């Protein structure tokens, strides 16, 4: 199967300064549960209505089920499920899923971050690392991020990274009890020939010195 061959490098751990991506592990269950419960109000408006990952159940079953599903999809070449870390501690999740091979070679990225460490550039850095891995190691061509119009914080992540806005997908996902519209953002490998992380580093440095983001050349 092509997807399995393409994910031969998985599992993989990636780091950029204090930000890390490492594979989801069963032993993360307690810190995951604590973080999800503490961040329930923060996450509820943006979370898919999915019985596998409810926000308010205190048992370990939902996490075990989710982890088993994602690890199976990784073995099948359909997902790359990471934990986001910050200074070595659990800080959220990032999953590249819905991988399609053949003539598409596309996927979707989703993420959440603990509110205690939000606003520190953690998720943009994590997304940049994940996208580069998908493009230049896994061999994907296109990555999408589908985000509710009201989710301004998540939209800022992909806009900072230069994802292209491609329009509204009407009632795309069941979120917080109803079918919700999403804005489709996307990047292809041609958009970042030198890597998204390189561009993100450069733009952060320019912003820190009062300059404008650089255009890709």
Image: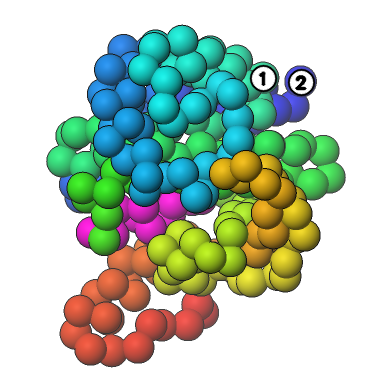
Give how far across and how far down residue 144 sits, in percent: 64, 54
Secondary structure state at the residue bearing disc 1: loop
> Alpha-carbon neighbours of circle 2 within 10 Å: few (<14), some, or many (≥20)?
few
Q: Which residue is at a point 19% across and 85% down the rendered structure image? A: 209
Q: Viewed as shown, does residue 56 lie left or right of 192?
A: left
Up the image or down, 176 lies above or below 83; here it is below
Q: Viewed as shown, does residue 4 lie left or right of 112?
A: right
Please say whether residue 139 is visible from this viewpoint: no
Secondary structure state at the residue bearing disc 2: loop
Q: Within the magenta stretch, is there residue 131? A: yes
Bounds of the magenta segment: 120-134
Give how far across and how far down residue 24 sits, in percent: 40, 24
The residue indicated by pointer 1 is 76
Q: Which residue is at a point 75% across and 54% down the rendered structure image? A: 171
Residue lying furthest front in this view? 177
Give how far across and how far down residue 14 sits, in percent: 34, 38
Give how far across and how far down residue 93 sits, in percent: 40, 37
Quick check: marks 2 and 1 in contact, CB under 8 Å? yes
Q: Which residue is at a point 32% across and 31% down the rendered structure image? A: 37
């Amino acid at each position: 199967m092509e997807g399995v061959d393409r994910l031969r490098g998985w599992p993989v751990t990636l780091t950029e300064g204090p930000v890390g991506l490492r594979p989801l592990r069963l032993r993360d269950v307690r810190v995951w549960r604590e973080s999800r419960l503490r961040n329930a109000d923060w996450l509820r408006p943006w979370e898919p209505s999915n019985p596998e990952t409810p926000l308010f159940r205190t048992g370990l079953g939902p996490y075990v089920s989710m982890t088993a599903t994602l690890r199976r999809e990784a073995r099948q070449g359909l997902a790359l499920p990471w934990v986001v870390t910050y200074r070595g501690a659990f800080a959220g999740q990032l999953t590249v899923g819905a991988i399609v091979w053949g003539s598409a070679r596309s996927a979707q990225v989703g993420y959440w971050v603990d509110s205690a460490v939000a606003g520190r550039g953690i998720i943009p850095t994590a997304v940049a690392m994940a996208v580069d891995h998908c493009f230049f190691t896994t061999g994907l061509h296109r990555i999408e991020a589908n985000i509710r119009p009201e989710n301004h914080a998540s939209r800022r992540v992909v806009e900072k990274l230069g994802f292209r806005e491609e329009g509204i997908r009407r009632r795309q996902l069941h979120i917080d009890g109803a079918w919700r519209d999403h804005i489709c953002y996307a990047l292809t490998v041609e958009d970042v020939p030198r890597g998204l992380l390189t561009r993100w580093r450069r733009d952060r440095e320019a912003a820190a010195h009062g300059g404008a983001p650089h255009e890709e050349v």
